[in-house]
Image (cartoon, rainbow, N blue to C red):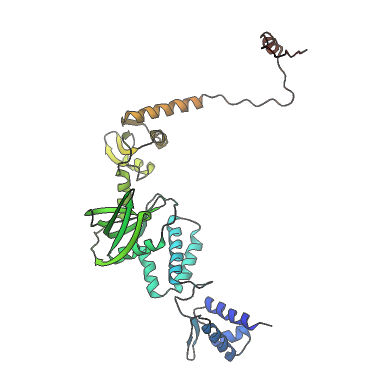
């Protein structure tokens, strides 16, 4: 015997699983008459569940699109945050693709047109570099605001902090990029009058503006981020000749490590580093002959690494320990006994 509350919840579950269901089908599933079904529908409507009734011969009931996301009810902001998490997981490669695609498809079926447009804006403006990384999740509102602005070609205002420097800027966002666990927006900075990139975690405030802008044709936001990170001065300048082809160098080296120039005899890598011991190990891992142009300190670091590798390689394998009672040769005992005992220490007699 079903409790009336249980039947009302069963109606809600059937409405979740079907885009539309007739009164006759509900009555048959619940083993009640259509009048009772209408009463259950009225109970759901009184609880705030947006059930719509369709009149006519082929009419029925359905949940209003955009208000119900199985198995729970979400606000639009909550739904958008959920969708965004799934999109990022798909692009970054977290988890299996099939469950992510299935969840996105289910949610998309019940999205209202306005919210579906925001989702398309996010998918159209987010880009990911070949180098993946998992970092702290940034504010979803910032990503949504910047993605929508980039999609609609509308300016944004932001308050930005880099180190101890805090500025207010207006930018024309071209795209949002994920790289090594961080998010960047690339666009025209009206304060500096140049194309710049900004980290989202350094944005203290963000507001959309109504002014529109024209995006440059064929602008690659991800490429701009990689090239900018590769040329930012932050350590000792380094120049190394790698004896391999440009194609092979691009395959073996991360694109944000530095710049590559093809020359006779190989490729010149220009970059910078503040940890030369780390960079010496990186050169060895590249797996090709190389010549260090400068600095001398890097050449010294490579030589130290070579000596350490040679020392480790010359170590003899450890002999297995003897099992059972240990014995000492008579020659060793005689050698030990020949040394005079320190004052206050007795001599152990053996036989």
Location of residue 287 (image quadrant): top left
Camera-side residue of 304 and 92: 304
Considering the image in quadrants, where does the C terminus appear?
Answer: top right
Residue furthest right in the image: 351
Side of 23 where 249 appears, left or right: left
Look at 52% across and 84% down and name the residue there.
46
Side of 177 where 29 appears, left or right: right
**With respect to residue 208, does 201 lie above or below?**
above
Q: Position of residue 79 (x, y in %)?
A: 45, 69
Side of 204 where 219 appears, left or right: left
Look at 54% across and 24% down and name the residue there.
315
- Number of labels in the image equals 0
**With respect to residue 7, does 123 lie above or below?**
above
Residue furthest front in the image: 344
Location of residue 167 (image quadrant): bottom left
**With respect to residue 57, does 238 lie above or below?**
above
Side of 17 where 92 appears, left or right: left
Camera-side residue of 277 and 218: 277
Considering the image in quadrants, where does the N terminus appear?
Answer: bottom right
Q: Position of residue 155 (x, y in %)?
A: 27, 63
Q: Position of residue 251 (x, y in %)?
A: 37, 43
Camera-side residue of 260 and 39: 39
Look at 42% across and 27% down and name the residue there.
304
Q: Position of residue 260 (x, y in %)?
A: 30, 41
Camera-side residue of 324 and 285: 324
**With respect to residue 278, does 175 lie above or below?**
below
């Amino acid at each position: 015997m079903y409790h009336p509350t249980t039947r009302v919840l069963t109606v809600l579950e059937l409405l979740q699983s079907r885009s539309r269901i007739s009164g006759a089908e509900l009555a048959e599933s619940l083993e009640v008459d259509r009048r009772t079904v209408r009463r259950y529908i009225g109970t759901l409507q009184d609880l705030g569940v947006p059930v719509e009734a369709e009149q006519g011969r082929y009419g029925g009931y359905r949940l209003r699109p955009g208000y119900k996301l199985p198995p729970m009810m979400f606000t639009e902001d909550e739904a958008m945050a959920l969708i965004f998490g799934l999109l990022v997981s798909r692009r970054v490669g977290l988890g299996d693709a099939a469950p992510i695609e299935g969840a996105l498809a289910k949610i998309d079926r019940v999205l209202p047109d306005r919210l579906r447009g925001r989702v398309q804006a996010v998918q159209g403006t987010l880009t990911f570099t070949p180098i993946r990384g998992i970092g702290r999740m940034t504010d979803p509102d910032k990503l949504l605001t910047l993605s929508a602005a980039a999609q609609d070609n509308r300016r944004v205002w932001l308050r930005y902090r880099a180190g101890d420097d805090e500025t207010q800027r207006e930018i024309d966002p071209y795209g949002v990029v994920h790289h090594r666990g961080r998010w960047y927006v690339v666009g025209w900075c009206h304060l500096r009058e140049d194309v710049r990139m900004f980290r989202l975690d350094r944005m203290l405030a963000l507001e959309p503006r109504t002014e529109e802008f024209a995006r440059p044709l064929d602008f690659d936001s991800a490429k701009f981020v990689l090239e900018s990170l590769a040329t930012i001065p932050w350590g000792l300048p380094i120049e190394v000749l790698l004896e391999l082809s440009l194609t092979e160098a691009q395959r073996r080296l991360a694109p944000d490590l530095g710049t590559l120039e093809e020359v006779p005899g190989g490729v010149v890598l220009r970059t910078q580093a503040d940890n030369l011991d780390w960079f010496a190990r990186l050169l060895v891992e590249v797996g090709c002959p190389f010549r260090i142009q400068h600095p001398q300190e890097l050449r010294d670091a490579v030589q130290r690494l070579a000596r350490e590798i040679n020392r480790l390689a010359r170590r003899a394998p450890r002999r297995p320990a003897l099992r059972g009672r240990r014995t000492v040769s008579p020659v060793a005992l005689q050698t030990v006994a020949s040394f005079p005992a320190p004052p206050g220490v007795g001599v152990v007699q053996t036989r």
